Amino acid sequence: DIVLTQAPLSVSVTPGESASISCRSSKSLLSSKGITSLYWYLQRPGKSPQLLIYQMSNLASGVPDRFSSSGSETDFTLKISKVETEDVGVYYCGHRLEYPLTFGSGTKLEIK
Amino acid sequence: VQLVESGGGLVQPGKSLKLSCSASGFTFSSYGMHWIRQAPGKGLDWVAYISSSSGTVYADAVKGRFTISRDNAKNTLYLQLNSLKSEDTAIYYCARSSGDAWGQGASVTVSS
């Protein structure tokens, strides 16, 4: 199974500042179709997860452009610019390269 | 796009439960669907997938005990949970294969 390792476990950010979350994969997530199968999700407190980023760097519908993602075949970074209070929650990376799908253990973002 | 789970509850170890996920706002028959669960205070754990043509894939932890199915005429996804164990206690989410739509979750508690 593909193991996704997230860091840090938690991050505390002042509103208006930036935050970065890392996700490292135990295997290349580049598919035979040339797509990097890395996804980012946000789970706000008490809510279902929502898709933020698909295929490593594409913003999901309705997601503000304060969110961005980049990376290689195995190392990925989610960046949140100008953090707002609504960004509080747990961020998960996940892949869809093969079964079983797996997710990182999550990074909790808090506001200072 | 809306996904609404139902059928959760408290069940004894070894017993069965059937979850439903009612879909609306999109052409349900054209999409593969996932069940993903989240144990209390834990991260996301993929459970099963069914393609638009009803091909299925399961996580090893549930293979032989859980069955995913769909009724396209009713726009409904199902998860039959048999031989339940305490470690199956979780919120169960249905999600569209593209990852951009999740239900609110159905709570399953396995306890005597």
Image: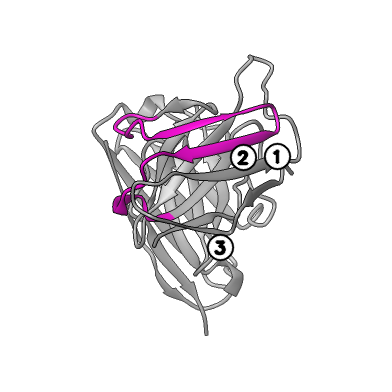
| Residue at 35% from the left image edge and 33% from the top image edge | B72
Q: Which residues are magenta?
A: A60-89
Q: Are marks 1 and 3 on the same chain?
A: no
Q: Left or right of A39: which side holds B8?
A: left
Chain at tag 1: A
Residue at (54%, 50%) from the top-left corner? B67
Q: Amino acid at mark 3?
A: Asn
- Nearest to the eye among marks 1 and 3: give it: 1
Q: Chain of mark 2?
A: B
Distance from the alpha carbon under mark 1 to that under mark 2: 22 Å
Three-letter code, disc 2: Val
Residue on which disc 3 sits: B82
First in sequence: mark 3 vs mark 2 = 2
**Quadrant housing the N terminus of chain B:** top left
Location of residue A12 in the rendering, given as x and y in whole percent from the top left corner? 46, 59
Q: Nearer the viewer, mark 3 or mark 2?
A: 2
Judged from the image, the secondary structure of the residue bearing numbered disc 2 is: strand
Q: Nearer the viewer, residue B61 or B42?
A: B42
- Residue A109 sits above or below residue A81 on the image: below
Depicted B84 relative to depicted A40: above or below = below
**Label 1 Cα neighbours within 10 Å, binned few <14 / some 14-19 / many ≥20:** many
Along the line of sight, the residue nearer the viewer: A66 or B60? A66
- Residue B57's label in the rendered image is 2
Q: Looking at the image, can residue B106 be seen? A: yes
Residue furthest top in the image? A33
Total number of numbered labels? 3
Three-letter amino acid code of the residue under disc 1: Ser
Q: Which residue is mark 1?
A: A25
